[in-house]
């Protein structure tokens, strides 16, 4: 969860088929679909009701409205809030705001539908949401952060308040060009254009990868990092992908080597106990292309399209069948994956209730496809603690027509899942 999402819609838009005869050319329209718990308005639907099936956020369907003519490009699901990034580079937020994680000030505790987040000096190209904090990267590579700052997870220094309710530029990175940021529960990790990796926030369990603990009177203590700090163990390694979970982090270098570090490796992998205080290579997953961290589990995709998962398996979130903890990476073997994972529809697994988007409260121990309307194409997906969001490209003959039959069963469609992510458990 809580990681960047590339913007592949430019390529998808160029692939629209030409119309024939007198029929108007179908228009590809971007839609934000969400499902899961609706408490605090985290789904942005204008109400508190939970959604059992993927539902388009109506805020971005209103023509001529605040964002009706500026469709969502990507989104990020956090603890109980959601960030929406539009195609023009504007940011909107909905949900819980108890620590200022929406970035709209501290006068409201929550919002039921998206509200614009202001304060950026350039257009935003990516957003990331943690438990109670949020970040955005602008087109010129500057990082903005807001929300809870109890452990320095905003990277603003020790003088910053415990709550920062509006976006603030991370000034100590003024000379760096930030390319990617991932947020955990109380820590943050970022990579620069040069492939360097920095981390900050709560340092417990080695989640920052700096490899140190303080010993006071025989008790092992960890300290927080209040500003971004270079992970020296990765010096000279060019990192291209990063991810953050509750208490662990992961990254992939340009050669496809997967590194992981953080809490209790029996929770996050390796088949051995103890915290990994520094980045450690996961040799079982060679030539990795994508990585995502859930609360206490990890998933990775290789260049051949194999999907691996390991760690905590509560509610069957690993998709391997059953609920036993998996201590070393195992590849998912399912008849559903007839194509490499870079070319599939959206599949979910894990706790039922309203989280998986299948319309029931069954726990799924193996991946099950999430069905959308037959003209919708998945572009990316983001999972929060108790809700999920996806951006869809849909064909529509007119700008105002609804490209979906909302909350109704649909035929299987060809989609393109360009990112992976993890649920909170």
Image (spheres, helix red, strand yellow):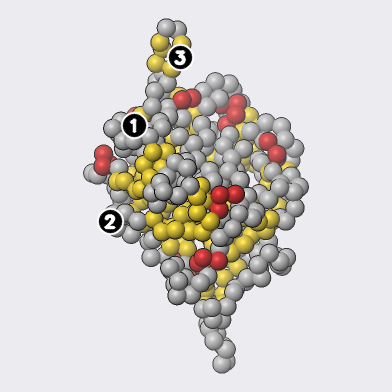
218 left or right of 386 in image: left
The local secondary structure at tag 2 comes to: loop
Q: Secondary structure under badge 3? A: strand
CB under 8 Å between callouts 2 and 1? Answer: no
> Compared with residue 199, is residue 182 higher up or lower down, i.e. above or below?
below
> Which label lies toward us, 3 or 2?
2
* Residue that extends furthest to the left in the rendered view of this protein: 175
Tell how many labels: 3
Who's the residue at 54% across and 40% down the image?
293
Q: Residue furthest bottom?
A: 22
Tell which circle, 2 or 1, labels the residue nearer the N-terminal end.
Answer: 2
Q: Badge 3 is on which residue?
A: 220
Residue picked out by circle 1:
226
Residue that badge 2 annotates: 121
Sequence-wise, the earlier of marks 1 and 3 is 3
Which residue does the image show at 53% across and 43% down from the upper left?
Answer: 79
Label 2 vs label 1: CA separation? 24 Å
């Amino acid at each position: 969860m809580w990681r960047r999402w590339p913007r592949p819609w430019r390529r998808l838009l160029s692939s629209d088929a030409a119309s024939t005869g007198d029929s108007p050319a179908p228009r590809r329209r971007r839609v934000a679909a969400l499902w899961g718990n609706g408490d605090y308005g985290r789904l942005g639907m204008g109400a508190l009701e939970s959604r059992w099936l993927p539902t388009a956020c109506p805020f971005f369907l209103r023509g001529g409205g605040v964002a009706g003519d500026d469709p969502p490009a990507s989104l990020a699901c956090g603890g109980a809030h959601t960030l929406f990034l539009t195609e023009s580079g504007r940011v909107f937020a909905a949900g819980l705001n108890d620590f200022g994680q929406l970035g709209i000030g501290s006068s409201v505790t929550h919002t039921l539908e998206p509200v614009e987040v202001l304060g950026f000096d350039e257009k935003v190209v990516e957003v990331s949401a943690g438990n109670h904090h949020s970040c955005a990267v602008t087109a010129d590579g500057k990082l903005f952060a807001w929300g809870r700052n109890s452990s320095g997870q905003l990277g603003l220094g020790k003088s910053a308040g415990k709550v920062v309710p509006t976006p603030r530029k991370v000034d100590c990175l003024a000379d760096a060009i930030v390319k990617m940021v991932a947020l955990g529960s109380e820590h943050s990790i970022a990579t620069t254009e040069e492939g360097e990796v920095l981390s900050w926030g709560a340092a417990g369990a080695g989640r920052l990868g700096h490899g140190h603990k303080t010993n006071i009177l025989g008790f092992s203590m960890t300290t927080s990092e209040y500003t971004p700090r270079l992970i020296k163990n990765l010096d000279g390694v060019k990192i291209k992908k990063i991810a953050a979970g509750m208490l662990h982090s992961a990254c992939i270098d340009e050669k496809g080597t997967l590194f992981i570090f953080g809490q209790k490796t029996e929770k996050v992998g390796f088949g051995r106990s103890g915290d990994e205080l520094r980045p450690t290579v996961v040799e079982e997953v060679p030539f990795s292309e994508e990585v995502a961290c859930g609360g206490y589990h990890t998933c990775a995709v290789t260049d051949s399209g194999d999907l691996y998962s390991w760690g905590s398996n509560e509610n069957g979130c690993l998709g391997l069948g059953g609920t036993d903890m998996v201590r070393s990476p195992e590849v998912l073997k399912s008849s559903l994956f007839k194509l490499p994972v870079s070319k599939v529809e959206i599949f979910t697994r894990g706790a039922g209730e309203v989280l998986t988007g299948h319309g029931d409260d069954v726990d799924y121990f193996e991946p099950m496809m999430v069905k959308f309307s037959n003209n919708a194409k998945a572009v990316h997906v983001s999972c929060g603690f108790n809700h999920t969001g996806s951006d869809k490209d849909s064909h529509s003959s007119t700008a105002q027509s609804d490209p979906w039959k909302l909350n109704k069963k649909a035929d299987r469609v060809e989609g393109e899942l360009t990112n992976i992510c993890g649920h909170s458990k």
